[in-house]
Amino acid sequence: MDTEKAKLQKFTEALLLEASQSADQILQKVEADRTSLLAKAEQELRAEVAAYIKKRTGEIRTREGSRVSAHLLENKRQLFAFRAECAAEISGHVAERLAAFEKTPAYGRHLEALLANALAKLPGDVPVTILLRPEDARHQNPLRQAANRNGICFQEGDFTMGGLVVLCPAKNLRIDLSFDTAYSDIANHFAELSGIDLED
């Protein structure tokens, strides 16, 4: 009887040991699975956070890029408008100054000086044609007398601001001393320096 009890006790202990070992193995497997699942969940969460940040960053960059672009375009529009206002104001002042100058006796003397400068480049026996605006036709006789040479004729020019143009067909030469050309040269130089086109 004692032997049977001893066997039973040994059997029970063996079962309990096996159950304990099995429980330990199950707990270890559960712990390993839990650790693996946590690591996987953490990795997925990091991937989701990274994707979310990337998406939001892209949205913010797009939104801010559009806002900055719109702001830059508005600044450019305002700059172009300001340039146009400056060009119109400067052109208006030039036109007023020229209109006032053309009403003075100094304008006639200036035309004579322009003509003398042009004729100095040409031999005295070469016929020339002097182009004037219709408004300056009254200066023909004083200019003819100031030139003091033969072979001079006058025609209407296609410029509008004043001055004169001397044509010498024999030399295939055009000497442009019109205010239109002078203004265009100055306007081009001014545009290079300031970015403002006076001729718009």
Image (cartoon, rainbow, N blue to C red):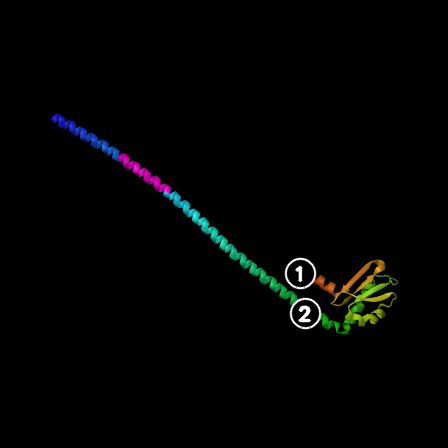
In the image: residue 23, left or right of residue 39: left
Q: Are marks 1 and 2 in contact (CB under 8 Å)?
A: no
- Categorize mark 1 by other alpha carbons within 10 Å: few (<14), some (14-19), many (20+): some
Above or below residue 101? Residue 38 is above
In the image: residue 120, left or right of residue 11: right
Above or below residue 10? Residue 72 is below
> Count the marks: how many?
2
Q: Quadrant of the N terminus?
A: top left
Give the quarter of the image for residue 131: bottom right
Three-letter residue code for mark 2: His
SS label for mark 2: helix
**Residue at the location (54% across, 58% down)?**
70
Three-letter residue code for mark 1: Ala
Report the residue marked by disc 2: 93
Give the quarter of the image for residue 135: bottom right
* Upstream in sequence: badge 1 or badge 2: 2
In reply to whether residue 115 is colored magenta, the answer given is no
Above or below residue 135? Residue 61 is above
Could you say which is closer to the camera, residue 101 or residue 84? 84
Give the quarter of the image for residue 86: bottom right
Q: Quadrant of the C terminus?
A: bottom right
Could you say which is closer to the camera, residue 8 or residue 100? 8
Q: Marks 1/2: CA distance?
A: 17 Å
Prevailing SS of the magenta stretch: helix
Q: Which mark is residue 191?
A: 1
Residue range highlighted in magenta: 24-40
**Residue at the location (35% across, 42% down)?**
38
In reply to whether residue 36 is colored magenta, the answer given is yes
